[in-house]
Amino acid sequence: MQKTNSLFLTSGLALAAALGCNRDQVQSTRVEKAAPAAMPPGHPPMGTPPAAMPAGAVPPPPQPTGGQALQWLLPKGWTTAQAGGMRFATLKPPAQGNAEVSVVTLSGPAGGELANVNRWRAQLGLPPIEAAGLASLRKVVQSKAGTVAVFEFANSGSRMVVGLLSTPAGNTWFLKLLGEDVPVNHAKPDFMKLLGTLSLG
Amino acid sequence: MADPPTPLPRRLWDALASLELTLISLALLMALVLLCTLAQTRLGIFGAVQIYMRSFIVWWQVPALPFRLPVFPGGVLVGLMLLFNLTAALIKRFDFTWGKSGLWIIHAGLILLIAGEFSSGAFQVETNMNIEVGQTVNFTESSRDIELTITHSKDPSHDQIYSIPASLLRRSESIAVPGTPITLRVKRYFENATLAMREQTDPASLATAGVGADVKVVAQPVVVSDNEMNQTSVFVEPVLKGQSFGTWLVSPGLAAPQTFVDEGQTYAMAMQHRRYYLPYSITLKDFRHDVYAGTDIPKNFSSLVHISHPAKNEERDVLIYMNQPLRYEGRTFYQASYGKEGKLSILQVVQNPGWTLPYISCGIITLGLLLHFGLTLRRSLQQRRAA
């Protein structure tokens, strides 16, 4: 009986130890390169869910730095939501499909135009370019907030249109329309108009 | 002459196998179920279950005190107590006679039932697969757990992804990433935090590289309710062959991965929901959301998926709908929800190696009850005839 007791108690301790042990460890996986869109479709938002706002002129979002905040006129049918974290706002075109605009601001030059262009190209699986190639890719939109440099990239069914704006206060703003080829193309005219309405409030 | 005192081990053994301990354990379990149910209104199901049922001790953080007080045994402790009690009782009163066989079978079934719950708690993994019509996905994602990933772009077509669970970041100061020359020094870990652009008056960021240098990180209370998500963030310093690559902020609040380059090799760090990659892929061919005619009342949700498993040379379509999950390679895919006006299907994916245990134990208990009832009835009838 004593032997049985010992065996039983030992088994109990082993079970408790097994339950207490941690399975978490670093794992390595080889996967095919991710689709260009950073977030998988349907990916649940992290942080506080944004509240939808009606279309029209939107009030200025919270001040990101000591400088002025960016304002814009929202195209008809678009909605905007103030996003958490690094996103200043998220804009949604009315078109069906996977396409949305992220508005992000950073203080300073944020790495410069070439570094950002190559970062965006990498997101779409495109090779980097040299500084000499920038001018041919850059389009310009004039707005009250200043000159917006616009770049467009596409690869493997995904498309990205990015507006880059440097403000007198030293902030850099990125307005990035990203998604599948068709909905981005559909939303692009309105997005270009939106870039023309940018102002500093 | 007085009897010699009972040795302590014997007394402990008697207490462990006692009926009193069974009743106390059952009463504690009932109280836990009640407390857990009440707590769900403020903590959500996940939070309440974690605090009351998946813990050894239920703690109470007294606002005025810097430490927590243990106030009640948790579900794990009570469950273990009951498991040991039933097993000890079975061993102690071992009397293998035909008349007692029903009781032994019932006990064995109960032990298996409790062991099955421990198995689920320890090994069950619940994730989601969010998939749009026409999309192909080869991973599932945890809705709760977060991981830091280091993506190494080795070749044009594939990435090597190293995943470090947040739970490992939480308790580690330094993590060597196997298969790479990288050691990650964890400078500061936030279970939940908000990010904002750093003002000139703010103290310097811990980050010395990447956008984190311009970001202010503010710790927030940990959230556990079902509709809230912690924004787990961490400052880490990658060190390769003794050389520091600066301190970086990695957070789901950052829109882009944080990338550094060593000898032409690019490493991108990001925080994301913990992913579980599958050796097969699933394509959503169609999603249907049927309603009763003339109403908006849901009648049925269904996802027509295509499974592609190259290693098994398997290609086939499966319809997943309410109460008809897909069971495949140890995982069960349930139709859980939908979104994007019916273009997005959300499947709950459960991997539980012990999923059959509750069914088996219920079958054993039923068999034991029938046997015990039959034997008791026969004995009663025999006694009546004898009288």
Image: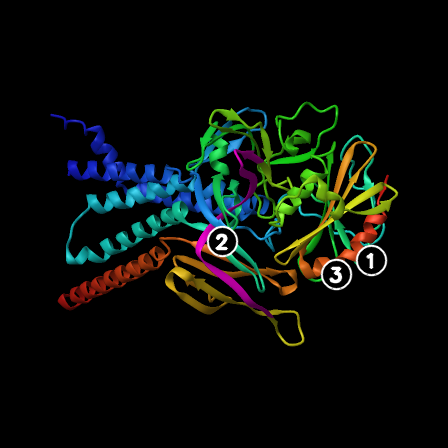
The image position of residue A9, as x and y in percent, is 25, 37
Who is closer to the viewer here, B195 or B125?
A: B195
Secondary element at tag 2: strand
Q: Residues within 10 Å of mark 2 (few under 14, many from 20)?
A: some
Chain where mark 2 sits? B
> Circles 1 and 2: CB distance less than 8 Å?
no
Tell me how the rendering is colored: rainbow
* Amino acid type at mark 2: Phe
Q: Is residue B267 magenta?
A: yes
- The residue type indicated by label 1 comes to Lys
Q: Is residue A189 left or right of residue B3?
A: right
Near-viewer residue (B268 or B368): B268
The type of residue carrying mark 3 is His
The residue under label 1 is: A76
Residues under labels 3 and 2: Cα distance? 30 Å
CB atoms at circles 3 and 2 under 8 Å apart? no
Residue B369, relative to residue B295: is it above or below?
above
Q: Nearer the viewer, residue B310 or B57?
A: B310
Residues shaded magenta: B260-289
Whether residue B112 sits left or right of residue B274 in the image: it is left
- Check residue B139 in the rendering and tell me which mark sits there, or answer none: 2
Report the Cα–Cα distance between label 1 and label 2: 37 Å
The numbered disc on residue A186 is 3
In the rendered structure, the residue with mark 1 lies on which chain? A
- Find residue A102 and name its label: none
Front of the two marks 1 and 3: 3
* Quarter of the rendering occupied by the C terminus of chain B: bottom left
Q: Secondary structure at mark 1?
A: loop
- Residue A130: quadrant of the picture: top right
Q: Chain of mark 3?
A: A
